[in-house]
Image: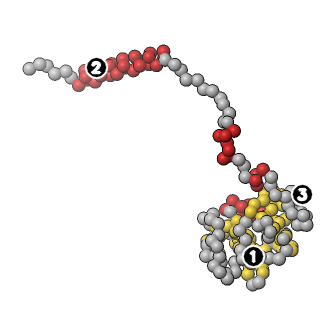
Amino acid sequence: MPARLPSWAWVSGLTVGAIAAVSVLAVQADQGPHPTAVATRPSPSATVDAKPSPEETAPAPVPDGSGTGRRIVYSLDQKRVWLVDASDAARRTFTVWPGTVSPGPGTYTVGSRTEGATTGSDGVQIEQIVYFAQEDGVSVAFSNAVDGSSPPPPASGTKTGGIRLRKADGAAVWAFATSGTKVMVVG
C-alpha cells in the first residue's frame, strides 16, 4: 500500500497552486485595458424630473394688507401659510388643508398649544396643535397628523376647524407660534 501524504502537504500544495494562478491572472490583467474615470455633467434630459417645485423657485409673496412685524399669515383663498419674522421677511411658506370651518379675515393671537398626540375632529391622530380662533363654536388651529398624512375628506355636515399641515411644516409652526403670536387671516 502506498504511503499517504500528510494533510499539511496537501494544503501547502493547494496554497502554492492558488498563489501561482492568482499571479498569472494579475499579470494578464495588468497588460489589458485600464478603465479611466471621466467627469461628465448630466445631460439636460437626465434632469428633467429633477426640476424644483414652483414653491422652491419663486415663493409666494406675503399678501398685501397682512400686517407688519413677526406674525403668521394665513390666506383662506390661497390655502397657504407664511411665517413672517420681525423684519417682515417670510421665513417659510407652504400650502395647507383647511378644515370645514374657517375664521373670518382679521387679527388673532395664538391662545394655547398642545404638543402631544390627540384625536382630531376628523378621527386622525394629530400633534403640535396651535389654537388661535373660535368660529361657530369650533376651535380653529394649525396641526399635523402624527403619521404625516393628509386629512381624509370630512364626512358630510362635519364641522372641523383643524388647518392640517405637513409634518415638517407643523414642526416649523410649533417652533414659531409661541403663545401670543399674532395670526393674520386674509381672504
Instruction: State which quarter of the image contains the C terminus.
Output: bottom right
Sequence-first tag of 3 and 1: 3
Q: Is 90 positioned to the left or the right of 155 in the image?
A: right
The residue most toward the bottom is 137
Q: Secondary structure at mark 2?
A: helix
**Alpha carbon separation for disc pair 3 and 1:** 27 Å
**Alpha carbon separation for disc pair 2 and 3:** 81 Å
- State the image quarter where residue 70 is shown: bottom right
**Alpha carbon separation for disc pair 1 and 2:** 83 Å
Residue 62 location (% of width, % of height) = 85, 61
The residue most toward the left is 1
Instruction: State which quarter of the image contains the N terminus.
Output: top left
Residue 108 location (% of width, % of height) = 84, 74
Q: Is residue 112 visible?
A: no
Residue 31 location (% of width, % of height) = 48, 15
Q: Amino acid at mark 3?
A: Ser
- For discs 1 and 2, the disc positioned in front in the rendered view: 1
Residue 13: mark in rendering: 2
Residue where numbered disc 3 is placed: 87
- For discs 3 and 1, the disc positioned in front in the rendered view: 1
Residue where numbered disc 1 is placed: 140
- State the image quarter where residue 69 is shown: bottom right
